[in-house]
Amino acid sequence: MPYDNLKGVLTMKKPMIAGLVTADDDYKDYCKAFEELGQEPFISLNLQDLDLADALILPGSGQDMNPKLWGSEDQCSNDINDALDAAQWALMDSAVKKGKPILGICRGMQFINVYFGGTLIQDLPCSASHKAATPEQYHDVLHLPATFMEALYGETSEVNTRHHQGIGRIGENLQVVSIWNDGEDSVVEAIACEQHSILGLQWHPEKMFLYGNENQRTDAKKLLQWFLTLEGEK
């Protein structure tokens, strides 16, 4: 993971957003954010379409992963969709093998962790501090020392939050780069892969970029642009 590539040149053009379009999830904000950054995003779950893409985006969703994927029973997961899990798993597997950069957002970060053998907490004990709210809810995150997140933001930055699940055991080859901690509870907020150009975020930078205040927009743009400089493996 090129943690020092903080002023690189944009290398991508066509990110593929692997989302299932429903009445609740239309992914228009993802498309609009990437379009404003000069990209040509497209939405698809078709495995063959991955060859057209420079990167894979695993977006957030109201549909939680099936806990059987990490060997657990369903306790309180929402709107499980096995077909969505299977389609994204195939895309993730192919993108890793082809060396394409991958960005996971919210559910997408959780998906990356499970793909690499990690687990999820089906409902965080502190979920009231992280669930979606109106107006949008924000909190600070801590960026761990000697990571690209610390290089981008320093010790802390502010992010939005709209999730009730979180990462449990960390997957193989993944590194925690950002956390939330209130002195009693801790939640993983960002992960990265040590061997590939893979980044997972528990927050929604696309919404920060489109709807946040000036500082929030700037922070989200900085991170999305950094991801767009990543090159796939040759």
Image (tube, rainbow, N blue to C red):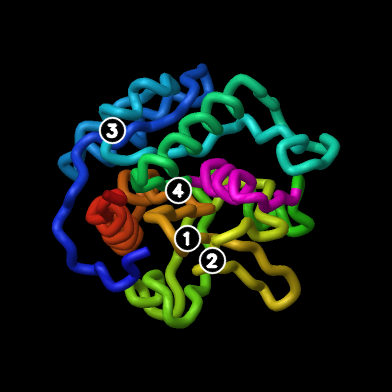
Say the numbered circle drawn on residue 192. 1
Is mark 4 in CB contact (under 8 Å) with mark 2?
no
Instruction: Say above or below: 67 vs 178.
Output: above
Residue 44 lies within the magenta run? no
* Crowd band around label 1 with a 10 angstrom C-alpha radius: few (<14), some (14–19), many (20+): many
Which comes sooner in the sequence, label 1 or label 4?
1
Instruction: Say above or below: 4 vs 16.
Output: below
Is mark 3 in CB contact (under 8 Å) with mark 2?
no
Q: Circle 4 sits in a helix, a strand or a loop, which is it?
A: loop
Q: Circle 2 sits in a helix, a strand or a loop, which is it?
A: strand
Label 1 is placed on what type of residue?
A: Ala
Q: CA distance from mark 1 to mark 4?
A: 16 Å
Please tell me in which quadrant of the rendered image residue 97 appears.
Answer: top left
Question: Which mark is nearer the camera, 4 or 3?
Answer: 3
Question: Which mark is nearer the camera, 4 or 2?
Answer: 2
Which comes sooner in the sequence, label 1 or label 3?
3
Q: Is residue 224 left or right of residue 93?
A: left
Residue at 45%, 75% in the rendered image: 156
Residue range in magenta is 105-121
* Crowd band around label 4 with a 10 angstrom C-alpha radius: few (<14), some (14–19), many (20+): some
Q: CA distance from mark 4 to mark 3?
A: 21 Å
Residue 24 or 121: which is nearer the viewer?
121
Question: Which mark is nearer the camera, 1 or 4?
Answer: 1
Residue 119 lies within the magenta run? yes
Q: Circle 1 sits in a helix, a strand or a loop, which is it?
A: strand
Q: Circle 3 sits in a helix, a strand or a loop, which is it?
A: loop
Residue at 39%, 45% in the rendered image: 207
Q: Which residue is mark 4?
A: 204
